[in-house]
Structures are given as structure tokens and as C-alpha cells.
């Protein structure tokens, strides 16, 4: 099942704003609005503690 990505909720802790060696996934990825067979997808599970520690949206 494909669900369009929402850039408003794809956020997290920023360790450095300009040095790419400190970047996290949410600072690097490019969100695609339509499915493409050559792209990868991320599959995960909810974990409020990890989200809380990284200044994300809990829930």
C-alpha cells in the first residue's frame, strides 16, 4: 500500500545545520509524491520513547 509522504511530519533532531557528516535521514531524503518502482520505501514501527528523545511528535 502506498501512502503519500507528508513533509510536515518528517522531522527530527538536527545535530548540525550545514555539516553533512552530522546530517540525519530527515535532512537528506527527498520525498516523492508518486510511487516509482525504482525507489525504496521505509518500513518501521511507532516507538514514542525514540521519538521523544529526538524531539519528534509523540503519538
Image (cartoon, rainbow, N blue to C red):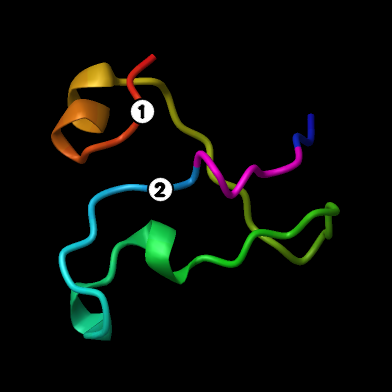
Locate residue 19: give its quadrant: bottom left
Spot occupied by residue 46 in the image (x, y as percentages of width and height) = 39, 20
Residue at image position (64%, 43%) is 6
Q: Secondary structure at mark 1?
A: loop
Query: In the drawing, does residue 29 fall left or right of residue 34?
Result: left
Magenta run includes residue 8: yes
Give the vertical position of 24 relative to 46 (above or below).
below
Residue at image position (42%, 23%) is 45
Q: Which residue in the protein does label 1 denote?
A: 57
* Marks 1 and 2 in Cβ contact (< 8 Å): yes
| Magenta region | 4-9
Q: Which residue in the protein does label 2 denote?
A: 11
Q: Nearer the viewer, residue 15 or 25?
A: 15
Hey, which residue is sitting farthest bottom in the picture? Answer: 19
**Label 1 packing within 10 angstroms: few (<14), some (14-19), many (20+):** few
Q: Secondary structure at mark 2?
A: loop
Give the vertical position of 23 relative to 59 (above or below).
below
Give the vertical position of 21 relative to 4 (above or below).
below
**Quadrant assignment for the C terminus:** top left
**Quadrant assignment for the N terminus:** top right
Main secondary structure type of the part rendered in magenta: loop
Between the residue at mark 1 and the residue at mark 2, the CA separation in whole angstroms equals 9 Å
Give the vertical position of 18 relative to 51 (above or below).
below
Spot occupied by residue 39 in the image (x, y as percentages of width and height) = 70, 62
Spot occupied by residue 47 in the image (x, y as percentages of width and height) = 30, 20
Query: In the drawing, does residue 3 fall left or right of residue 30?
Result: right
Amino acid at each position: 500500500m502506498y501512502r503519500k509522504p507528508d513533509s510536515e511530519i518528517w522531522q527530527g533532531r538536527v545535530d548540525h545545520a550545514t555539516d553533512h557528516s552530522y546530517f540525519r535521514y530527515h535532512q537528506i531524503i527527498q520525498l516523492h509524491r508518486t510511487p516509482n518502482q525504482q525507489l525504496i520505501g521505509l518500513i518501521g514501527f511507532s516507538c514514542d520513547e525514540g521519538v521523544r528523545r529526538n524531539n519528534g511528535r509523540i503519538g
